[in-house]
Image: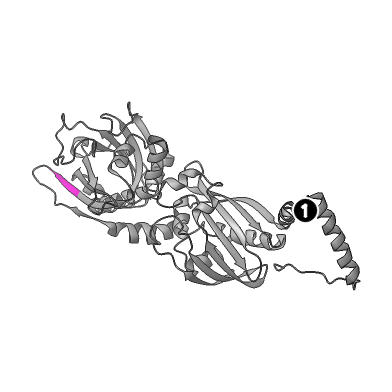
Amino acid sequence: MLTARLRPTEPVAYSAIIKCLIVITLFQLAACGGKTDSATASTSETLQQSKKLALSVADVRPEAFSWLWNNQTLAILQHANPAIESFQWVFEPDNPHDLGYEANTEYKITAKIDGTLHDISVRYNPPASVSERVDSINFLGHRPFSFLAMSVYIDQEPAIDVLIQYTAAGERYLNSNFEIELTSEGSAEVVESYANFLSDTLRGTSSFLSAQFDDDYLMKELLPRGEYEVTPVDLSTGVFKVIAVQDIKYISPDMLAWWWDHINNLERYRFWQPIDHDAFHYEVVPSNPDLQYDIGATQIIREYIGASLMTLSIAGADPDVIVPPTALTEPRPYYFYSLNGIEGIQEFNGIVNPLPSVVSIIPTSQNQLVHQWKPSESGEGVTLHSTFTLSAAVLAIQPTFGDDLGRHVMREFQMMPYFLPRLYRREWMGE
């Protein structure tokens, strides 16, 4: 059973007990020079229970958990763990639409643990309360991105302080590894039972949380943060454009200028878009990574645009050699100009292509990209203008490509507030 029980004692001579306690106390005071601090600390250490555990959740990246903490519902929790019977926010998060938990948020649930129904209250603790126990890079961004600190109260039991740390795992960084530490001055039995309950709940998200995160956050929350338009095909040139404008909070113009030469690998590429991005490597590595993209540096990426999985090449272009299809209105280094090619198509609208590496008939020279950015009027970040100039031949392969790309660019860049400031401040600024 969850609740710790005390065994009844035999009748005793209480006066004898009191005399013994007085003698023991006087002896301890004499040994400590009349001071009681060390004895109190020793007693506290004896009472404290601690448990550590590690687990892995397949097919759910850390970003989905950073969203979950502030967006839990009864339906989500019951999907993860049917033992949960009720859920209610006591103090709702003020801004649940930023990834990372919000301190002083509180909720309560009722759930069966070890077959018995219990009332459980959970309060999110200030991130600074565990600053010595987590990676300091968490504090270089808007909110923590790889941990949750909380206090859990089960019925009338003493609080269980829980620190949950999580990172991307697996060969393709599609899973999440957890390290969890629970401490309490209550019973070891209570700590053990809650640890098992928490583990079951986290593992239970494997079958659905990524899709829920995609639908509820990437689509419903991120897409409205910007706008795009798809132009008609210009019959004289055989091209059309996708033009997108969006404000991105919590990043600076220099951060975005730095990013192009520092994407580096798949792990970081998935930070940028955890659902759509599938593969990354440099075909031509930047020769001088700094705040200006390297002309000639070439990325080979594989990503979902809509329901199609494509391999693309993105080569930094020189605007003095090849005139961009749209005017550059921002000074160096606050633009990125590239020539883009479709190297292969692995899936057509979810159907695997048996010939994914067939060279595309779409001319690379017609596919060009210009990103330009400046400080936003609100002062909270940057305003990004993106212009994709594309061969109309892509519409023969994917008629909805223009709209799919417009949505894709929102899903990408609106993720930047949650990783780019940390990387830039740690790696470029040395913080």
The quarter in which the N terminus is drawn is bottom right
What's the residue type where badge 1 is placed?
Gly
Q: Residue at x 41, y 43 (%)?
A: 422
Position in image of residue 109 (x %, y %): 55, 70
Q: Would residue 342 appear left or right of 45 to someone viewing this image?
A: left
Residue range in magenta is: 238-242
Position in image of residue 156 (x %, y %): 65, 71
Q: Is residue 310 above or below residue 78?
A: above
Q: Would residue 64 appear left or right of 326 to someone viewing this image?
A: right
**Residue that lies at the very extreme toward the front in this rendered image:** 34
Q: How many marks?
A: 1
The majority secondary structure of the magenta stretch comes to strand
Position in image of residue 410 (x %, y %): 29, 52
Which of 327/22 is in front?
22
Q: Would residue 95 appear left or right of 21 to someone viewing this image?
A: left
Q: Quadrant of residue 327?
A: top left
Q: Residue at x 37, y 37 (%)?
A: 263
**Residue that lies at the very extreme toward the left in this rendered image:** 236
Q: Which residue is disc 1 drawn over?
A: 34
Q: Is residue 399 visible?
A: no
Q: Residue at x 45, y 59 (%)?
A: 102
